[in-house]
């Protein structure tokens, strides 16, 4: 998709034909299935990417699951739920994919 940051409304254009490993989740903004890779101080967005060529994208065999914003909000005890805290020392969720290489 052309949507770069769900909440920021930016866009991203590339001269290369690359696909996000999580492109199927990028259009879920503002739905109950909205996912995120960054969360802090009330902001939740899918802003971390793994770009793959079409041939590698087709060979993706697995990827890390991304949490739902609704899950974060349901577990939060304050008004601005965040990943950042004593139990998770980063405001980013990891992204990773397994790709089957030929040969």
Image: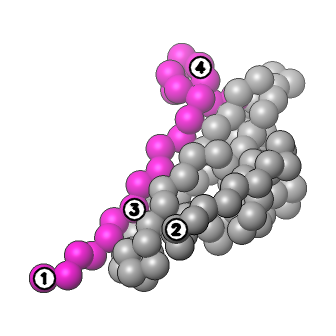
**Residue 57 sits in which quadrant?**
bottom left
Res 39 visible: yes
Q: Mark 4 points at which residue?
A: 85
Q: Earlier in the sequence, mark 4 or mark 1?
A: 4
Q: Which of marks 2 and 4 is nearer the N terminus?
A: 2
First along the sequence among labels 3 and 1: 3
Q: Name the residue under label 2.
A: 16
Cα separation, mark 2 vs mark 4, equals: 38 Å
Which residue sits at x=61%, y=24%? Answer: 84
Tell me the CA gap for discs 2 and 3: 20 Å
Looking at the image, which residue is at 86% across and 24% down?
Answer: 79
* Dot label at residue 97: 3
Q: Which quarter of the figure has residue 41?
A: top right
Q: Do the residues labelled 2 and 4 touch (CB within 8 Å)?
A: no
Q: Which of 15 and 10 is in front in this view?
A: 15
- In depth, the one of 54 and 23 nearer the eye is 54
Q: Which mark is residue 103?
A: 1
């Amino acid at each position: 998709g052309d949507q770069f940051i769900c909440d920021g409304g930016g866009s991203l254009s590339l001269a290369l034909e690359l696909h996000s490993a999580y492109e199927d989740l990028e259009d879920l903004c503002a739905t109950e299935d909205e996912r995120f890779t960054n969360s802090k101080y009330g902001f939740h967005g899918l802003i971390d990417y793994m770009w793959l060529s079409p041939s590698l994208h087709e060979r993706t065999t697995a990827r890390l699951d991304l949490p739902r914003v609704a899950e974060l909000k349901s577990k939060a005890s304050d008004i601005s739920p965040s990943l950042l805290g004593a139990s998770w020392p980063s405001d980013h969720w990891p992204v990773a994919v397994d790709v089957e290489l030929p040969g």
